[in-house]
Image (cartoon, rainbow, N blue to C red):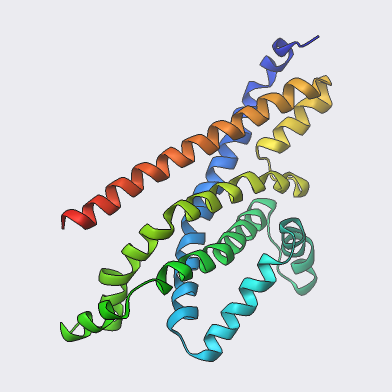
């Protein structure tokens, strides 16, 4: 028999967990996308050595489980003197993971830029940096924006494993609550609903930002 009233005393636990998940998602999305854009530019237009280094990083992260990356950062780095709190380790793992995937997605967008745009910008006297930021990057991101949005949501959902190192996120709250009142079905049902709500809100937020940014580019 379902009994959600047993969860009411733990409302604060769920809200704190939800807030932690939102906080981690905001920071990791912002930093991961910035790092991904920088690495994508380096891989697409940098020297062969720099492109190779970025390629190794991307392949390493994309071909290893996220939870192993997390455990390496939290449990492995202390052996060489790098001590991190669970929150710091979780955020760094999310940034590194998102940056690797977004690097390849953004690079795909950069690769679709017609050569004529670079030549036109050169004729106008624009520097490499000006051409990249004003001519190439925004149209490239516009083309891969849906894929980028999906990847950010995937990373948010993947943050559920951070509870394994005691990050007090939404899944950690669900584990804590069900261990105290044994209402596992209700606890995880509520948690699943909150993750679904977060994913929907993230997609709507990305869509709104995309409409503003890309319509601005067109009108200008």
Name the foreground residue: 46 vs 173. Answer: 46
Please indicate whether residue 133 sits to the left or right of residue 159 in the image.
left
* Relative height, residue 43 to residue 37 (above, below): below
Q: Is residue 13 visible?
A: no
Residue 189's spot in the image, x, y percent?
70, 25
* Relative height, residue 123 to residue 59 (above, below): below
Identify which residue is drawn at 65% across, 59% down. Answer: 93
Q: Is residue 62 visible?
A: yes
Identify which residue is drawn at 54% across, 36% down. Answer: 198
Q: Quadrant of the C terminus?
A: bottom left
Query: Which quadrant would residue 132 be assigned to in this image?
Result: bottom left
Query: Which quadrant would residue 62 be assigned to in this image?
Result: bottom right
Residue 14's spot in the image, x, y percent?
64, 28
Residue 172's spot in the image, x, y percent?
72, 37
Identify which residue is drawn at 68% across, 21% down. Answer: 10
Residue 193's spot in the image, x, y percent?
62, 27
Name the foreground residue: 29 vs 85. Answer: 29
Please indicate whether residue 183 sits to the left or right of residue 200 in the image.
right
* Relative height, residue 133 to residue 6 (above, below): below
Q: Quadrant of the N terminus?
A: top right
* Relative height, residue 160 to residue 35 (above, below): above
Identify which residue is drawn at 54% across, 31% down. Answer: 197
């Amino acid at each position: 028999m379902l009994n959600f009233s047993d969860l009411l005393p733990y409302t604060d636990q769920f809200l704190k967990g939800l807030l932690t998940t939102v906080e981690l998602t905001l920071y990791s999305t912002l930093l991961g996308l910035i790092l991904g854009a920088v690495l994508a530019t380096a891989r697409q237009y940098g020297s062969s050595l720099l492109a190779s280094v970025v390629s190794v990083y991307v392949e390493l992260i994309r071909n290893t489980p996220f939870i192993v990356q997390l455990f390496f950062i939290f449990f492995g780095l202390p052996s060489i003197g790098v001590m991190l709190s669970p929150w710091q380790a979780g955020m760094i793992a999310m940034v590194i993971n998102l940056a690797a995937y977004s690097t390849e997605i953004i690079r795909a967008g950069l690769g679709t830029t017609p050569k004529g745009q670079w030549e036109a910008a050169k004729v106008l006297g624009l520097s490499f940096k000006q051409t990249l930021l004003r001519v190439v990057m925004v149209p490239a991101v516009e083309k891969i924006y849906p894929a980028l949005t999906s990847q950010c949501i995937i990373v948010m959902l993947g943050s559920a494993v951070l509870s394994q190192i005691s990050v007090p996120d939404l899944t950690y709250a669900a584990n804590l609550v069900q261990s105290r009142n044994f209402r596992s079905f209700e606890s995880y049902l509520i948690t699943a609903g909150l993750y679904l709500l977060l994913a929907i809100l993230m997609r709507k937020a990305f869509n709104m930002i995309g409409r503003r940014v890309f319509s601005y580019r067109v009108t200008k």
